[in-house]
Image: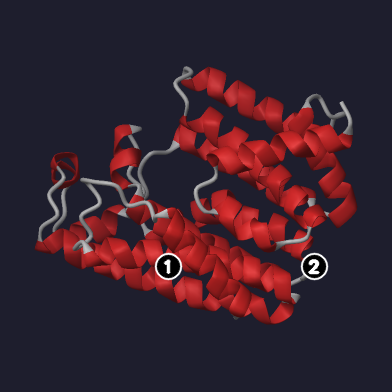
Amino acid sequence: MTVADAYAEVERLTRREARNFAYGIRVLPREKRQALSAVYAFARRVDDVADGELPVEEKRKRLHELRNALDAPPADAMFVALADARSRFRIPDAPLHDLVAGGLQDTEQDRYASFAELHGYCRRVAGAVGVACVAVYGSDDVERAETLGVALQLINIIRDVREDWELGRLYLPQDELAAYGVTEDDIAEGRAGPEWGALMGFHASRARAYLDEGLELLDTLDSRSAACVSTFAGLYGATLDRIEARGFDVFEGSLRLSPLTKLRIVGAGLLR
């Protein structure tokens, strides 16, 4: 398989599967778009294993195989594309290994005692994506790239409470649930009462604070990379606004943005 064929495959995957990612990278030059599609394809494969229906031990086996494959000759299209992207843009090894560590953590832990504990997880599964991507953008502001990734993961956690619950996971910190008087039975029953609204309002405020800090990354980027990152942030911010407008009821109905809304946000990023 040629490198061109490999990139074509990861780009098809990204267009088909990515909710927001595919919209953001449209504004990038082809080489950067291809490299980020390779990073997405690797992260997606890790997620598919961690969130799949295989027995836990088989999940762990496959995740270890993915980590080992990062240091071996490319075995399929995704690894061919990723190897080329790593070489071309000097994507560091650490964030890719961190992504696998986050997948392994999902096979070992389904509750988080505190935000400090949750933050460590968010750094592995999303902060790591930010660190991998910032090398492609051409910036060395790793700290803000990681912060931005954490912000997006915090919004995902709010949006995906029901979906994660069905996987047996609850990422909302246990001490904060207790402080706001929200029980796991409330989540199981989809009760979006005043206590839930107050808890989610607190989480939304924290996510926005991380988002604002992470967006300082834009000052270190070229115009098209900045437009890409601004688009990601706009899409996630709009999703959070929609959730808040619904009283943080994330238990019923679709929370996805329409294609027209997404295109408007892309346009705003380009005009920034």
Tell me the residue at 56%/61% (across/down): 149
Residue annotated with mark 2: 138
Instruction: Give coordinates of residue 250: x percent, y percent.
Output: 25, 51
Q: Amino acid at mark 1?
A: Gly
User: Residue 38: x, y in percent?
Assistant: 72, 43
| Residue shown at the point (27%, 58%) measured from the top left | 175
Q: Is residue 155 left or right of residue 20?
A: left
How far, Cα to Cα, is label 1 from label 2? 24 Å
**Residue 80 in the figure: left or right of residue 17:** right
Quarter the C terminus occupies: bottom right
First-in-chain label (1 vs 2): 2
Helix, strand or loop at label 1? It is helix
Amino acid carrying mark 2 in the image: Gly
- Answer whether residue 5 is visible to the viewer in this image: yes
Position of residue 255 relative to residue 9, above or below, is below
Label 2 SS: loop
Observer-nearest residue: 48 or 35?
35
Q: Is residue 42 visible?
A: no
Q: Which residue is mark 1?
A: 237
How many residues crowd mark 2 within 10 Å: few (<14), some (14–19), many (20+)? Answer: some
Q: Residue at x 40, y 66 (%)?
A: 238
